[in-house]
Amino acid sequence: MPSPSPAPLPVEWVSPVGERAPAGRVRYRGPLAAADRPLHLHLAFDGAPPPFRHVPLERDGDGSWAADIPEADGHTLLDFAIAAADDDWDNNGGANYRLWIGLDPVDAHVHARTPGLDELGFESLRIALASGGMTHGLVSWQDNAFVDRVTEGVGWLTKLVWVSPGGPEPDDVRRRLAEGAVGLKLHPTYDGYPADTPGLDPFLQVAAEAGVPVTVHTAPGPSDPDLVRRLAERFPQVPFVLYHTFLGHPEGRRRAARHAQELANLHLETSWCRSAEVRRLIDEVGADRVLFGSDAATDGPVHFVRSPPNLEMTENYNESLLTLARQLPPETLRALLEDNTRRLFRLAPPRLPQAVPEPVEDVRELFTAALEQAERVVARVGREQFALPTPCAEWNVQALLGHLLATVQRAERVAGGQPASSVPQVLAVDTRGRWASRFEAATAKARHAWSRDTAPADVPAPWGLVPGPVALSGFVLELVAHTHDLVVGTGSPEPLDDRLATAALRIAERLVPAALRGAAVADPVPAAPGAADYARLAAFLGRAPA
């Protein structure tokens, strides 16, 4: 029987990268989340010393806590702990928490061999990664079955398959790759074989067939970079990553860098390299061929923050990363800490935390109110207004009516488990005066579809498979925003419900990520000081001021 899934990383951004400055929102699910007392972030930017900022957290409906980070623009990092009272702290096992404002970093080299807080323990790894602001890690250990168990259901770890000439069998490697592993791990020193042995060829052939990279521990002796180069020459179609670049004398790193300059399928990883060495490797090999890794949690929970420092006795990892963030161009830093590893190992983009939906009954009530408001506005539209422009630049009044009708029909279909794409984005609206009755009939069906005793579980919303209340929140946003667009386009005197605007703005701030900007939703525009919530909602969705 599989072991229970360990807890997720306890802190994460709610806001995607593009929406974290000048202010963004973070979520906390750590050990103090069950507290019945107010929680606060004790925050510093970029490792600054006291005095710290004290930011109150608000409890959300799922039991987590969230806070808006003030005035983060121009900073790189958040460093913080959580407090329920002066004597009741969550400081991440003594290592504190870190989040990157403009990045979702990936650690390309981590290990777990036990479940606990010892060196290379899973809990040590969780604490270490949270202390460095890592959002994802590539994990391996000689016991592949243990790695399978301890990482089951853990979204912030992706597995590599540890192989050696002694096993596992190539078919087992194929199976593990099919089940989600993204590459192979070789450790010639630990397993006692020369890195260029022909005994690895069956596994490298599997890697070539699957199109996955091979990571290799590099150090003096059987793991020497010269031997790894021979593997890369035998299998030029396979990307190889030299873990540590070279764990030893600087001369070995010089040779590793030269090999990478000469062979396009060699990449360098930077664990145990101080910041000056990382910069040198980037200069010599190129920003697209160097990956950040830490070898966590070799030094246990304090791996990223150890004192005395563990990087060549001059820096710890967090000091090194902050130095690199200050010295490297932003695109180079992003390549090092995120893009190169995601690209090479074909990692999915970072998963944003699921928006916390309104309570189910509240969302249904909002949906019903939004439908009724839309009915009243649609009933006032005259045929002579069809050609008028609307705040949705691509739609006139007639097309906007067709989109509102499509939105209502999509809501009905989604509640029944059908995909939203089964209804076009804009339905045809005739000019014979029956659009109001047709819209009213559609709203009655949608209202009935969402009025069951239990809300649908996961449903196929336009933006993917999501919990029913989240999908319904999205339809509330669509209805409220486009009803307001119709009022503006037609000059209708129909009064609008301010409560719906407030709710829709809150939903928009949670459900509309930066990735949709420029596609489904335009970039935000400034709202006038003191603007009402309908005007603020329109501005957030990219509508020019009316």
Image (tube, rainbow, N blue to C red):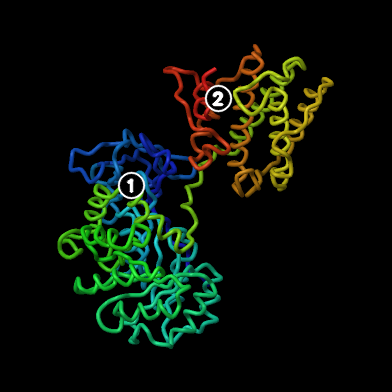
**Where residue 437 appears, x then y in whole percent?**
80, 24
Dot 1 crowding, Cα within 10 Å, few <14, some 14–19, many 20+: some
Q: How many marks?
A: 2
Q: Residue at x 65, y 47 (%)?
A: 459
Instruction: Determine the image quadrant of residue 224.
Output: bottom left
**Where residue 78 appears, x then y in whole percent?**
30, 44
Instruction: Determine the image quadrant of residue 546.
Output: top right
Q: CA distance from mark 1 to mark 2?
A: 37 Å
Q: Is 545 placed above or below 46 here?
A: above
Residue farthest right in this picture: 432
Q: Is 458 placed above or below 340 here?
A: above
Residue 495 falls left or right of residue 225: right
Dot 2 crowding, Cα within 10 Å, few <14, some 14–19, many 20+: many
**Where residue 355 appears, x then y in whole percent?**
51, 42
Q: Pointer 1: what residue?
A: 330
Q: Residue at x 25, y 70 (%)?
A: 253
Residue farthest front in this picture: 262
Residue 205 or 172: which is nearer the viewer? 205
Residue 425 or 59: which is nearer the viewer? 425
Q: Amino acid at mark 1?
A: Pro
Q: Pointer 2: what residue?
A: 501
The mark nearer the N terminus, 1 or 2, is 1
Q: Amino acid at mark 2?
A: Ala
Q: Secondary structure at mark 2?
A: helix
Residue 345 falls left or right of residue 367: left
Q: Is 546 placed above or below 35 here?
A: above
Q: Nearer the viewer, mark 1 or mark 2?
A: 1
**Where residue 279 appears, x then y in whole percent?**
25, 57
